[in-house]
Image (cartoon, helix red, strand yellow):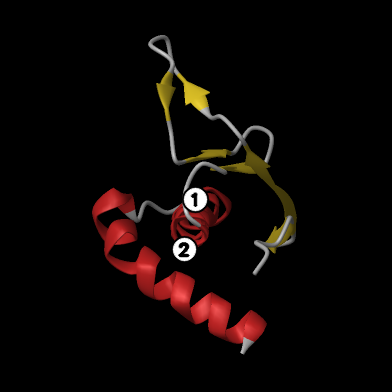
């Protein structure tokens, strides 16, 4: 089940990039995912299981949504809904 590569949020187009490595910051910490509002890209680390990639995708999607709607959900709320959201999105896309 492939993660969508393009998204539209509030009329803005976002690209989803699945990458083999995702390092960030001065210490090169490896991340599961990253939302970059400046380029409107979501990055998903391919080293995760397919299930975890979907959960990470939904997590980063929430951050993109925060950016486009200028709201702050915060990690605590996002982490509570990301798994259920992944199940919901997959059921809509793939039945």
Vertical side of 13 occupied by 43: above or below = above
Q: Which residue is mark 2?
A: 51
N-term-proximal mark, 2 vs 1 = 2
Say what secondary structure mark 2 lies in: helix
Which residue is at 72% across, 61% downward?
8
Q: Which residue is mark 1?
A: 60
Q: Quadrant of the C terminus?
A: bottom right
Which residue is at 44% across, 57% downward?
52
**Tag shown at residue 70:** none
Q: Answer with left or right where residue 83 lies relative to residue 93.
A: left
Which residue is at 44% across, 41% downward?
32
Q: Quadrant of the N terminus?
A: bottom right
Relative depth, front residue between 1 and 7: 1
Vertical side of 2 occupied by 5: above or below = above
Which residue is at 57% across, 44% downward?
46
Of the two numbered discs 2 and 1 in the rendering, the one whose residue sits closer to the viewer: 2
* Residue 88 placement (x, y as % from top left): 48, 80
Vertical side of 58 occupied by 19: above or below = above
Sort mark 1 into few (<14), some (14-19) or many (20+) by Cα contacts within 10 Å.
many
């Amino acid at each position: 089940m492939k993660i969508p590569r393009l998204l539209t949020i509030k009329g803005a187009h976002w690209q989803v990039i699945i990458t083999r490595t995702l390092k960030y910051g001065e210490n090169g910490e490896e991340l599961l995912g990253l939302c970059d509002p400046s380029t409107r890209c979501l990055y998903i680390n391919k080293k995760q299981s397919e299930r975890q990639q979907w959960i990470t995708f939904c997590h980063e999607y929430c951050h993109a949504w925060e950016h486009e709607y200028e709201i702050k959900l915060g990690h605590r709320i996002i982490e509570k809904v990301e798994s259920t959201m992944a199940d919901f999105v997959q059921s809509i896309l793939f039945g």
